[in-house]
Amino acid sequence: MIRTLKLKTTRFWSVHDYDYVSKDDEPPEDEDLTCPMILLITQEKQMLREPWREAVIVKLLGKGVGYMQLKKRLKTKWALRGDFSLIDIGHDYYVT
């Protein structure tokens, strides 16, 4: 018996649906001195977020599959013509 992995794609949101620059430019009022804090201005946030703007996070649910098998199935499911990068970030999460 051959079992197949079914990939379900759902559109949650698009980069055009929300302002990807947060409005958290104000430092928090309840500052914890034991926790380091890095404050960034809006332009720095934009610069750091830009490479990840169109990234997709993939979470495997249920039975895991190998890296190459997942990459092949995503390429087929998404009908991609060229190559794409798939980065294993651990705990069955991937970034593409």
Image: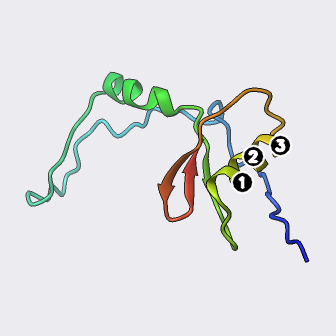
Are the residues at dot 2 and dot 3 in contact (C-beta closer than 8 Å)? yes
- Above-or-below relation of 8 to 39: below
| Residue type (three-letter) at the residue carrying disc 1 | Gln
Of the 4 image quadrants, the one containing the C terminus is: top right
Q: Does dot 3 land on a helix, a strand or a loop? A: helix
Q: Which mark is residue 25?
A: none
Element type at mark 2: helix
Q: Is residue 50 left or right of residue 28?
A: right
Q: Is residue 76 above or below residue 31?
A: above
Q: Is residue 69 or residue 45 the one in the foreground?
A: 69
Residue positioned 34% across, 22% down in the render: 43
Q: Residue at x 61, y 43 (%)?
A: 56
What number is the disc on residue 69? Answer: 1
What's the mark number on residue 72?
Answer: 2
Residue matched to label 3: 76
When the figure is inspected, residue 15 is found, relative to residue 60, above or below; the finding is: above
SS at mark 1?
Answer: helix
Decide if residue 73 is on the left or right side of residue 44. Answer: right
Separation (CA) of disc 2 from disc 3: 6 Å
Please state the horizontal and vertical placement of residue 77, each as a whole percent of the image: 83, 45
In the image, 15 versus 78, the foreground residue is 78
Q: Nearer the viewer, mark 1 or mark 3?
A: 1
Percent of width and height locating residue 53: 54, 31
Q: Residue furthest right?
A: 1
